[in-house]
Image: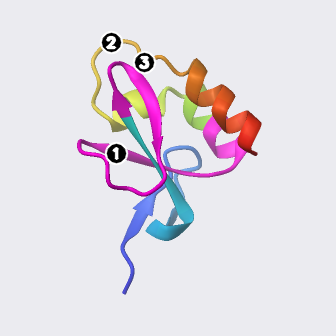
Amino acid sequence: MEPVRTCVGCRARAPRSTLLRVVARDGSLVPDEKAVLPGRGAWVHDTTDCVEAALRRRAFGRALRVSGPLETQTFQETHQRKG
């Protein structure tokens, strides 16, 4: 049975393989497409709606337990170009 994670954007539970893992690196959000980077990860559907909802609600900072602001601009631009 495949592990289930909760999307920080829409709060729906989904199989891990259908979600994108995001980690904090040096104060910036970084997509972890292979899900192998060390540290705490947040899971989000790889859709514009879910990513924007998570950014708007500041869910990444809470899920990653980061104190202080996260630089999200680079992650946001990368995701928009991709999708």
Q: How is the image coloured?
A: rainbow
Q: Position of residue 47 (x, y in %)?
A: 69, 49
Q: Is residue 58 above or below residue 79?
A: above
Q: Is residue 82 left or right of residue 18?
A: right
Residue under label 3: 70
Report, in whole angstroms, how far the alpha carbon at label 2 lies from the one at label 1: 17 Å
**Magenta span includes 30:** yes
Instruction: Determine whether the residue tagged by mark 3 lies in a helix, strand or loop.
Output: loop
Q: Position of residue 5 (x, y in %)?
A: 41, 62
Task: Give the magenta range.
Answer: 24-52
Q: Is residue 66 above or below residue 33?
A: above
**Magenta span includes 7:** no
Q: Earlier in the sequence, mark 1 or mark 3?
A: 1
Name the residue located 49 percent from the left edge and 53 percent from the top edge. Answer: 33
**Hey, which residue is sitting farthest top in the picture?**
68
Name the residue located 36 percent from the left edge and 87 percent from the top edge. Answer: 1
The quarter of the picture where residue 16 lies is bottom left
Q: Position of residue 64 (x, y in %)?
A: 32, 35
Q: Earlier in the sequence, mark 2 or mark 1?
A: 1
Residue under label 2: 68
